Image (tube, grey):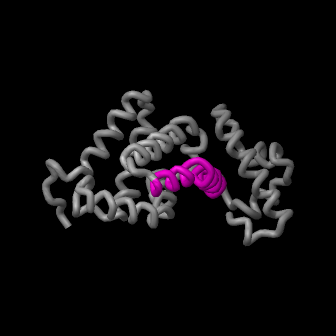
Amino acid sequence: MRAGTLRSDAFSSVSRIIDAARRVFASGDGSGTLNRIADEAGVGIATLYRHFPNRQALARAVYERIFAMEIEPLFIEFEKSNAPRAVLLDVAEHLVTVVQNEKGLVSSIGNLTEVTTVLLRRSSEPLGAIVGRAQAAGNIRPDIDASDIPNILAMVITGLGVLGSDKTTRRRYLSLLLDALNPAQATLLPR
């Protein structure tokens, strides 16, 4: 939900609902009912349903807020960085951490890989510039499109997040993924 499309009181309600939902989903005690979320947000259940028709829609809004507040700022660093691999590794690792730490949220989202891909595609402009620079420098294989990156990251992030790997294991597999984008030993991708 974007602030510009809501009245200020409705925006305030939505914001409180999303904040409450994140807390309730994070409690992980299985009692993350919409009634409990509405109570914690200080709104009626009808207000919650007016903005979020079901649990999945609310969970996706919470995930979108997390993405906007915690992941998208990393793409600014990614765009400015002379070490884009390290920043991309940070982005991927942070997303895996979110998936692992927000289990109640993740179980309510539905298709986590699809939602993550959609959110990552919002950063396609900085990704396109970085992929182009890295390809020109010979650091990313020439047959990778910027549009491939959100799909690849979403698949790996959601897989690692669900597996519950420790930080060292996550870093190992995310590094392996990024090395696979390197052209040194690459075979041409099928179209």
Where is residue 143 drawn, in percent x and y? 22, 63
100 sits left or right of 131 in the view = right
Q: What residue appears at the point 41 percent right and 48 percent down from the top-left corner?
A: 88
Which quadrant would residue 144 be assigned to in this image?
bottom left
13 falls in the magenta region: no
| 76 and 173: which is toward the camera | 76
> Which residue lies most toward the front here?
82
The magenta segment is 56-80
156 sits left or right of 120 in the view = left
Magenta stretch prevailing secondary structure: helix
Q: What residue appears at the point 81 percent right and 43 percent down from the top-left corner?
A: 40
Q: Is residue 35 above or below residue 100?
A: below
Where is residue 71 drawn, in percent x and y? 54, 50
Q: What residue appears at the point 62 percent right and 51 percent down from the top-left corner?
A: 69
126 sits left or right of 140 in the view = right
| Residue 190 visible, this orientation | yes
Where is residue 149 drawn, in percent x and y? 36, 57
